[in-house]
């Protein structure tokens, strides 16, 4: 996960980075946060997932123009415009801006990040290596669970398709955790979005499958599950 900030004033750049870092630490989200004082340097590294972009940059640079170039290039990066003049925000419809954040109210960054991570699972694509060395494309919005299957991992999709891939379940659980998945016991990672019901001992997924909650995971799972539900209902 790469989050970038393009802001020419150091004081605002530092404040914005601190707000994003605090959010990620509080939510236990692993993210690379990169800062730039101009758009030219950023445009040389445009593979960001989320961009906080100042509308009014120094010199002849313009935040809207940078965003237009990103759209023209096919970038899927979400853009949060930063401004001290909210009347300028209406111009952002041309580039389908994700958010407008008033610099006087940087607490709005938390809401933007909440919304971004809540929707990110709908867009995230991962790749894994199958048992014969092929590359499998998996859309996380369609992934129900991952479970151990011998020395392989079984990826079960909503429509019943399954993929058997290389990997360690603990490492896979860590990489999927920012996108609404939880390591509910030593053999299963589940998509929190597709949990139908929960009791003290087990969960039931939308396909009717019941999975026991591991003893060492129980307390943390319940905390994460209810946090996810609250976030999803915002």
Image: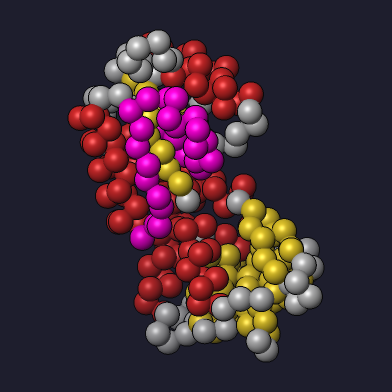
Residue 53 placed where, x, y %? 40, 27
**Quadrant (top left/top right/bottom left/bottom right) for the C terminus:** top left
Seen at 79% across and 75% down, the residue is 132
- Give the side of residue 174 with respect to residue 85, left or right: right
Asked whether residue 124 appears in the rendered view, the answer is yes
Residue 74 in the image: above or below residue 166? above
**Viewer-proximal residue among 223 and 23:** 23
- Give the side of residue 65 with respect to residue 54, left or right: right
Residue 146 in the image: above or below residue 59? below
Residue 47 placed where, x, y %? 53, 40
Seen at 50% across and 33% down, the residue is 44
Question: How was this image coloured?
Answer: secondary structure
Hey, which quadrant is residue 217 in on the image? bottom left
Residue 81 placed where, x, y %? 41, 25
Looking at the image, which residue sits at the far left?
11
**Magenta-span inclusion, residue 43:** yes
- Give the side of residue 34 with respect to residue 10, left or right: right
The part of the chain drawn in magenta is: 28-52
**Viewer-proximal residue among 9 and 108:** 9
Residue 140 placed where, x, y %? 63, 57
How many circles with numbers are drawn on the protein? Answer: 0
**Magenta-span inclusion, residue 216:** no
Asked whether residue 95 appears in the rendered view, the answer is no
């Amino acid at each position: 996960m790469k989050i970038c900030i393009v802001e020419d004033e150091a004081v605002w750049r530092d404040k914005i980075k601190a707000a994003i870092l605090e959010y990620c630490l509080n939510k236990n989200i692993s993210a690379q946060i990169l800062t730039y004082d101009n758009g030219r340097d950023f445009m040389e590294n445009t593979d960001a997932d989320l961009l906080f972009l100042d509308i009014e940059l120094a010199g002849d640079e313009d935040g809207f123009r940078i965003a237009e170039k990103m759209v023209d290039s096919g970038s899927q990066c979400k853009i949060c415009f930063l401004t001290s003049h909210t009347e300028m925000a209406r111009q952002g419809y041309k580039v389908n801006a994700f958010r407008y954040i008033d610099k006087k109210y940087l607490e709005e960054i938390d809401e933007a990040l909440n919304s971004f991570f809540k929707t990110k699972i709908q867009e995230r694509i991962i790749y894994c290596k199958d048992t014969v060395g092929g590359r499998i494309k998996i859309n996380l919005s369609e992934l129900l669970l991952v479970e151990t299957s011998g020395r392989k991992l079984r990826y079960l999709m909503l429509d019943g398709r399954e993929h058997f891939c290389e990997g360690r379940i603990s490492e896979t659980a860590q990489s999927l955790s920012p996108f609404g998945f939880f390591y509910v016991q030593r053999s299963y990672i589940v998509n929190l979005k597709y949990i139908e019901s929960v009791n003290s001992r087990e969960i039931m997924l939308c396909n009717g499958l019941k999975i026991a909650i591991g003893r060492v995971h129980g307390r943390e799972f319940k905390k994460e599950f209810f946090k996810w539900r609250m976030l999803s209902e915002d």
